[in-house]
């Protein structure tokens, strides 16, 4: 069965202030994650945590190399926002489940039905193939 995003979940995730771990967020200003993470932080009012292999800080926020490296004082993670290729996102979703995240958001073009099913089975909210910067307009955000 193909995943369908629930508009109620979309709106709730964007309206409820929380902590978003942005996986794939680097200092590369040409990547979609760079501007979208600013939108999430500055427009939606979320705390963002950059997650990238070298653990580089981004937008003045401390970076971590994996979700497991995010310290306890930065927990819980409300949303794991995935800016990684579809063939890599399953491992990120599994990490999100392992660290007790509440939701996973797979960005535009990031599709993995099996990973989405695992996340739902673990009790996480799932958004797939969507962008909060684009969807926010629908909800007047």
Image (tube, helix red, strand yellow):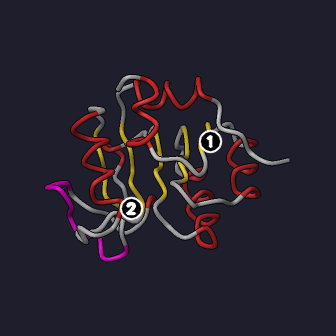
Q: Residue at x 40, y 66 (%)?
A: 24
95, above or below 11, in the image: below
Give the percent coordinates (x, y) of residue 103: 55, 40
Query: In the drawing, does residue 87 fall left or right of residue 3?
Result: left
Q: Nearer the viewer, residue 12 or 99?
A: 12
Q: Is residue 60 magenta?
A: yes
47, above or below 32, in the image: above
**Badge 2 local density, few (<14 within 10 Å), some, or many (20+)?**
few
Give the percent coordinates (x, y) of residue 62: 21, 58
**Badge 1 local density, few (<14 within 10 Å), some, or many (20+)?**
many
**Looking at the magenta stretch, what is its main secondary structure?**
loop
**What element does badge 1 sit on?**
strand
The magenta region covers 53-61
Query: Residues at badges 2 and 1 in contact (C-beta under 8 Å)?
Result: no
Q: Is residue 54 magenta?
A: yes
Q: Which residue in the structure is indicated by mark 1? A: 126
Q: Residue at x 36, y 69 (%)?
A: 52
Question: Residue extending furthest left?
Answer: 60
Query: In the drawing, does residue 43 fall left or right of residue 14?
Result: left
- For the C terminus, the image quarter is top left
Q: Nearer the viewer, residue 7 or 49?
A: 7
Q: Residue at x 41, y 33 (%)?
A: 136
User: Which numbered disc, 2 or 1, marks the residue that appears first in the sequence?
Assistant: 2
Could you tell me how far apart the alpha carbons at marks 2 and 1 are, in whole angstroms?
22 Å
Which numbered mark, 2 or 1, is in the foreground of this view? 1
Q: Which residue in the structure is indicated by mark 2? A: 69
**What element does badge 2 sit on?**
helix
Q: Residue at x 36, y 46 (%)?
A: 72
Question: Residue extending furthest right?
Answer: 1
Give the percent coordinates (x, y) of residue 82: 49, 57
């Amino acid at each position: 069965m193909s995943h369908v995003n629930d508009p109620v979940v979309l709106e709730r995730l964007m309206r409820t202030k929380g902590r978003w771990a942005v996986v794939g967020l680097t200092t590369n200003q040409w990547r979609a994650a760079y501007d979208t993470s600013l939108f999430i932080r500055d427009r939606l009012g979320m705390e963002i945590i950059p997650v990238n292999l070298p653990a580089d800080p981004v937008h003045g926020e401390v970076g971590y190399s994996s979700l497991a490296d995010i310290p306890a004082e930065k927990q819980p993670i409300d949303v794991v926002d995935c800016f990684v290729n579809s063939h890599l996102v399953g491992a990120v979703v599994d990490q999100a489940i392992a660290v007790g995240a509440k939701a996973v958001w797979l960005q535009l073009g990031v599709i993995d039905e099996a990973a989405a099913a695992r996340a739902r089975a673990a009790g996480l909210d799932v958004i797939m193939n969507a962008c909060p910067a684009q969807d926010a307009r629908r909800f007047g955000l």
